[in-house]
Image (cartoon, helix red, strand yellow):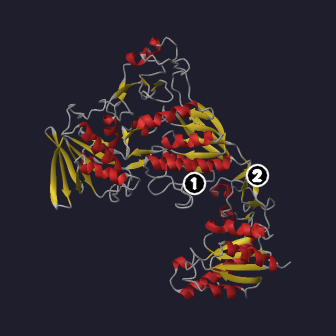
Amino acid sequence: MKKRTGVFVCHCGINIAGTVDVEKVAKDLAQHPGVEHAEDYVYMCSDPGQKKIIESIKENKLDNIVVACCSPTLHESTFRNAAKEAGINEFQCEIANIREQCSWVHKDKAKATVKAERITKSAVERVKKNQSLEPISIPVTRRGLVIGGGIAGLQAALDMATSGYEVVLVERSPSIGGHMIQLSETFPTLDCSQCILTPKMVEVSKHPKIKLMTYSEVKDISGYVGNFKVKILKKSTFVDPEKCYLCDECTKVCPVVVPNEFDMGLTGRKAIYIPFPQAVPATFILDYENCPGLVPIVCGKCADVCDSDAIDFDMQDEIIEEEVGAIVIATGFDLYDKANMAEYGYGKYPDVLDGLQFERMLSASGPTQGQVLRPSDHKEPKEVVFIQCVGSRDPEQHCAYCSKICCMYTAKHAMLYKHKVPDGQAYIFYIDIRSGGKNYEEFVYRTTEEDRVLYLRGKVSKIFQDGDKIKVWGVDTLAGKHVEIDADMVVLAMAMRPSEGAQDLAKTMKVAVDKDGFLAEAHPKLKPVESVTSGIFYAGAAQAPKDIPEAVAQASGAAAKAIGILSQEQLFHSPMVAEVEFNLCTGCGMCVDVCPYEAISLKDGKAEVTDVLCEGCGTCQATCLRAAVTVKNLTPLQVFEMIDASIGG
C-alpha cells in the first residue's frame, strides 16, 4: 500500500530562512511523489509548531513525516514524540538536516535552496521504506561505579550513595583525597583544604552504600549501559588492615628511604608507610617496588617487629569483578612534566619548585610545618619569583590550552608567602590574568593592593644559578624594559595534564579523548558530562582543567545523570540496529573486525548482533561482501534511493 508522507519545513527564525527559501522548499516538496502534504513554519519545534504537525498527521491521514530543520541530535526526539502523539509509529519520522548541513555552511541562497530540497527529498525516500519499530528494553543493574577518589570522585560517589544506590569507588592510590588533600589553603576563601575535605573522605569510608577500593585499577570493561561488567585489579598492600593497629614500629626499622610522593619529593618515606596522617583508609602499605625484596625475602625487619602479625609477604594481587549500571570517570590531573622545562632549571636547581611543592611547603602538615624555606639551605627566601603559564598557552613548544586555575593559585601563593614572610618581596610574571569565578578578581586585587605583590606582564626567558641566588631574566612588556631579578626561590605554575594512565583507561572504557588528551564530552554545550558511550559520565579535571567548585558541580551533574539511569527499572535502546540474514552469512568475521562498538560476534559460524550494543552506524553493512548485514530503516535500497534523490535523479 502506498504510504502518505508529510513534509514540514522549519524557518528556525533566520538560521535557516536567512540562507534558504523555505517557502519554495515546502512548495516544491509538495509536488514530490508520495508527499501528500507540505508546509513551512517559523519554529517547528515550538508548541504551536508541534501542534501543526500533530493536526496535519490526523487531518491528512499521514503514514510518515519528514521534518526539515536542525540537527537530529537536538530535536529528533521532539518530533518523534509528536508523531507518536498523533498516532503513528515514532520511527516513521525522519529529520532532514537543512541547518547545520545546508544553511549554516552556504551563502548563495539559490544554491542553498536547491541543496535543502535535495536533502529533504532524500529523507522522504528513506522514510517511505521505514519499518514501524519498537524500542529495545534493557534491564538495569542499580549500582554505580566511580573511578577516581579526588574531590570530584568523592562528591559523585556521595551523591549517588545518599540517593540510595550502591557505589563502588575505585582509586589507584593507597588513599582517597587526590591533589586537593595536598593543598595548604584554597582560593578565594583561604579555607584549609584538609579541614573541608577530610570530613568527606571519612563520610565516604563510613557510608554503608559505598564500597571503597583503594590501591586498585580498572583493567577491563564489557557490557553496555545499565549492565556493565568491570574487572578491577586490587593490588596487594602486604599489610592486613584488620590486624594492623598503626603502632608505626615497622617504619622505624625499615632501612629504605625513597622520595615521598605526597610531599612532592621534598621529604622521604620508608618502603612501608602510610601516605599521610589523614589517609583514608588509614593503613600501612608495603611498597613492593622499593622493598629490598620479597621473593626471596631479603630484609623482613618490618615483619619481625610487628606484634600483631599484620604483615603478610604472601599476599597476592586479585581481580575483582563488579556489575554496575552507570559509571563516572573522575581521574583528575597531573602537572606537566617539569623535565620538559629545562630552560627554567627545574631538577637542576633545588630552589626552583612547582606549585604543588610550594603548597606542601605552605601546609602546616608539610615538610617545613608551614614555614617557607629554601630547600637548598633551609633559609627564609626574601625574594620569590612566581612564573605563570609554564607549559600552558604555548602551542609551539608545550600545551596550547590555558590551564585555567594557575592565575588564581599563583595569586594565592604570593599572598600566603607574604603572610609567612612579611618583609619578603613577591614577583609574578604573567601573560594576562584570567580570574573568572565568584570573588576571584577581588582576590587577585587583594594580592596587589594589600600584600604589595609586584605583577610583571611578560615572559621569563632564562633562569640560572648565580652563587646562592637564582637569576631570572624576563621582560616587562608594559614598561618596555628587560627585567633581571636575583631571586632566592622560583615557583613555576605548571600546566595541568590528564592524570597518568588516563588515556589507557579511556581505551579500556571505549570513550574518546580530545587533542590535548583530556576526556572528550559527547557535546560541549548540551552533554558536557556525558561520554560518547552511553552510561559513562565525566567529572572534574579528567575532562578539562577545573578549579574545585567547578569540579564539585560537575561531579554532582555527572552523579545526577548516573542516578537518572540507576533509578530506572529498565532502559530503552533504539531499535535501528543491524540484523543478520543467516542464509547469506558465511561467517567471514569482517563485520566483527570493523564494528566500533563490539556489538557483533561469531556464534556457530554466523555473525550475531547484540542489539543493545549496536548504534546503527552501518559500518558492518558497508563492509559485508554478501549483503548479509543490514541496518533497520537504513537498508541498501533506502541508501541508494536517498543518493538518487540527493543528486537530483
Residue in the foreground of this view, choosing between 451 and 285: 451
Q: Position of residue 363 (x, y in %)?
A: 34, 34
**The residue tagged with tag 2: helix, strand or loop?**
loop
Query: Is the Cβ of the residue at disc 2 closer than 8 Å to that at disc 1?
Result: no
Instruction: Give whichever of discs 2 and 1 has the lower sequence position.
Output: 1
User: What separation in Å lies between label 2 and label 1 (alpha carbons)?
Assistant: 37 Å
Q: Residue at x 22, y 48 (%)?
A: 452
Q: The disc labelled 1 sits on which kind of residue? A: Glu
Q: Please, is residue 189 above or below residue 593 in the view?
A: above
Q: The disc labelled 2 sits on which kind of residue? A: Gly
Going by the image, does 264 lie left or right of 351? Answer: right
Residue 166: image quadrant is top right
Residue at image mark 2: 605
Image depth: mark 2 or mark 1 in front: 1
Residue at image mark 1: 530
Going by the image, does 439 lie left or right of 378? Answer: right
Q: Residue at x 63, y 35 (%)?
A: 209
Q: Residue at x 56, y 61 (%)?
A: 526
